[in-house]
Amino acid sequence: MLRANDRLMGYSVSWIRPDVFGAMAPPTEALLAGGSLYAWLRENLGIEISGGVEFIEANLASQEIAQLLDVELASAVLVVTRIAKSTAGLPVEFAVVTYRADRYRFRVEL
């Protein structure tokens, strides 16, 4: 769950390439609850995320997402699909982040 000032903002699910862990166990959800996945990758595996691509779409909250985000079924949500890459240009993370549309907005500079 993503929070800002103790307010629920969104829900994130990430998949990390298994080969980046080597013999190290992946971080637990509890470990990441108080920190950043990217900081953990940098500090524990020496992997720096340097870029990637995101797609932002409007969608309607499914039953599961509505319950997780504490919104009405079929409420407007923003869904971000991300592929994050290392400084070597290799894809490291695939993430789907669903934000409450009533509490989140994106700013893009051109």
Image: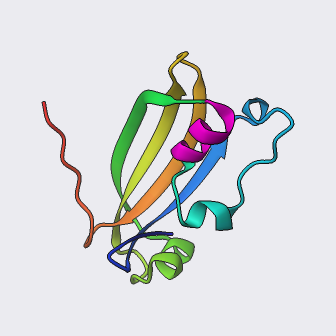
Query: Residue 41: within the magenta?
Result: yes
Here the colouring is rainbow
Q: Is residue 41 above or below residue 34?
A: above
Q: How many numbered marks does the figure carry?
A: 0
Q: Is residue 90 above or below residue 2?
A: above
Q: Which residue, as the protein is rendered here, is positioned at the far top? A: 88
> Residue 106: x, y in percent?
23, 51
> Residue 80: x, y in percent?
41, 49
Q: Which residue, as the protein is rendered here, is positioned at the far front? A: 43
> Residue 87: x, y in percent?
50, 20
> What's the residue at 12%, 30% (across, down)?
110
Q: Quadrant of residue 75?
A: bottom left
> What's the residue at 53%, 45% (across, down)?
39
Q: Which segment did they paint magenta?
A: 38-46
> What's the residue at 38%, 63% (across, down)?
99
Q: Quadrant of residue 58?
A: bottom left
Q: Quadrant of residue 24?
A: top right
Specify whether 84 is left or right of 55: right
Query: Residue 25: within the magenta?
Result: no
> Residue 89: x, y in percent?
53, 17
Specify whether 21 is left or right of 52: right
Q: Is residue 96 above or below residue 17?
A: below
Specify whether 19 is left or right of 77: right
